[in-house]
Image (cartoon, rainbow, N blue to C red):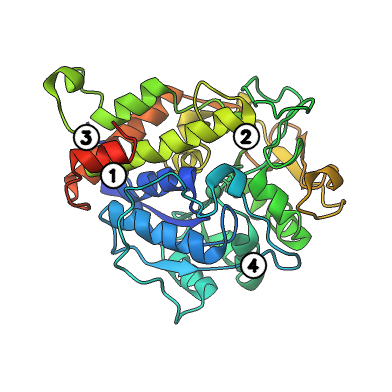
């Protein structure tokens, strides 16, 4: 059953999110894995504008029965450019297609600087224990280490979902947009969304991937890995009914949390089939950054390889993808064995990941977060 932390010691984590469909699963894992202590959440521009990603985050935490977790709105745009959002993937709200979201009760924290809140929460943990986990654009993260460089020494690690490497880094299916050739990015043919946006922030990219203290503590989970974890119809059914083989015959009704998270994954599945022709199921990007912090051993890097990471920051930052060139491309150089650098796994135990997700849903079920959802609402929401 539950996976216990060694001798009960919890892993302090802080999440920085741009809550869209896959960020919701990152919040699920961070809020309900039995080994984590979720210190707080900061929000950032990305999938949708900041006020929307903040609302979505508060609503998901409400659904998870974790209104105790404080949400701190962060940056509304990259430090020196305009924001670009992902309405084509997540819809205008960032969580389109989801009718079962509860109204959040806990207000966002506006009276304290989000950077100070992040610093205080992380700096007051025991040295070398806390993980900072980024599942959105990297603007907040870059600003944090610029204002508080010492944190790079104090924390155990930084886990980032972002980047797209390509060139056979893994053999994950990357999908294809009509009329394009090789694609390994999802924002442009070369650039992945979270890192692409940060390439509008060259300072942030440089201060993270080339920081001599931070880089060896950083795990980067690129699309090349996340596209190995697909929310297939079988996975969605399993998570909806808690892998109960009698679910259909017994007429069991899914719990409100499971109904909500299945609805989230179903919308994402539709988007990936439509936009990237990935019809077997959507890659669930963001929770992998959480899993990589909680259970690094579930991810495999070939023989402990480490990398130098460089983001292509030349090119016109523009919403029209045609004029962007290779802006935002993640270029990696494998380092000689033993030389410290960024950890970029090439794969993971996918079954183990879905098991952790199931355990987190069981924990969320045990917390009484949401009112019973009627069959009518479930059907209306397209869950059953
Ligand atoms: O490219 C995928 C990443 O960009 C995910 O974090 C998704 O939520 C978006 O932020
Ligand atoms: Ca995200």
Q: Which of 54 and 115 is in front in this view?
A: 54
**Badge 2 element:** helix
| Crowd rating for badge 4 (residues with CA inside 10 Å; few <14, some 14–19, many 20+) | some
Residue at 25% x, 43% y is 377
In front: label 2 or label 3: 3
Residue 380 is situated, as x and y percent measured from the top left of the image, at 30, 40
Tell me how far mark 4 sits from mark 1, CA to CA.
30 Å
Residue at 31% x, 68% y is 106
In front: label 3 or label 4: 3
- Residue that badge 4 annotates: 143
Which picture quadrant has residue 109? bottom left
| Crowd rating for badge 3 (residues with CA inside 10 Å; few <14, some 14–19, many 20+) | many
- Residue that badge 3 annotates: 254
> Position of 307 compared to 258: left or right?
right
Looking at the rendered structure, which numbered label has been put on residue 45? none
- Residue that badge 2 annotates: 223
Say whether residue 268 is visible: yes
Residue at 68% x, 61% y is 83
- Ranked by sequence position, the earlier of labels 3 and 4 is 4
């Amino acid at each position: 059953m539950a996976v216990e932390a060694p001798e009960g010691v919890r892993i302090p984590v802080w999440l920085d999110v741009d809550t869209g469909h896959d960020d919701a699963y990152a919040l699920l894992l961070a809020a309900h894995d039995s080994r984590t202590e979720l210190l707080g959440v900061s929000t950032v521009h990305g999938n949708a504008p900041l006020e929307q990603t903040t609302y979505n985050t508060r609503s998901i935490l409400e659904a998870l029965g974790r209104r105790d977790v404080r949400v701190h709105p962060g940056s509304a745009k990259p430090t020196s450019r305009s924001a670009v959002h992902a309405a084509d993937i997540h819809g205008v709200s960032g969580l389109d297609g989801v009718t079962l979201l509860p109204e959040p009760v806990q207000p966002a924290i506006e009276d304290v600087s989000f950077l100070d809140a992040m610093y205080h929460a992380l700096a007051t943990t025991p040295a070398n224990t806390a993980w900072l986990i980024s599942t959105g654009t990297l603007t907040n993260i870059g600003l944090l280490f610029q204002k508080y460089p010492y944190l790079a020494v104090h924390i155990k690690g930084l886990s980032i979902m972002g980047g797209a490497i390509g060139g056979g880094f893994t053999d994950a299916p990357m999908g294809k947009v009509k009329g394009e050739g090789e694609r390994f990015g999802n924002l442009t043919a070369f650039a992945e969304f979270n890192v692409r946006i940060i390439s509008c922030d060259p300072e942030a990219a440089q201060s993270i991937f080339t920081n001599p203290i931070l880089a060896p503590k950083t795990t980067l989970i690129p699309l090349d890995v996340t596209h190995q974890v697909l929310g297939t119809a079988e996975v969605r059914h399993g998570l909806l009914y808690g892998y109960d083989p009698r679910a259909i015959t017994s007429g069991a009704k899914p719990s409100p949390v499971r109904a909500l998270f299945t609805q989230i994954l179903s919308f994402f599945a539709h988007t990936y089939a439509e936009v990237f022709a990935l019809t077997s199921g959507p890659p669930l990007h963001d929770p992998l950054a959480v899993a990589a912090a909680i259970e690094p051993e579930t991810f495999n890097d070939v023989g402990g390889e480490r990398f130098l990471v460089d983001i292509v920051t030349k090119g016109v930052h523009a919403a029209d993808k045609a004029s962007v060139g290779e802006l935002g491309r993640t270029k990696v150089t494998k380092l000689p064995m033993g030389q410290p650098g960024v950890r970029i796994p090439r794969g993971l135990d996918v079954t183990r990941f879905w098991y952790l997700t199931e355990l987190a849903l069981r924990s969320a079920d045990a917390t009484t977060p949401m009112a019973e959802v009627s069959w009518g609402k479930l059907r209306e929401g397209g869950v059953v």
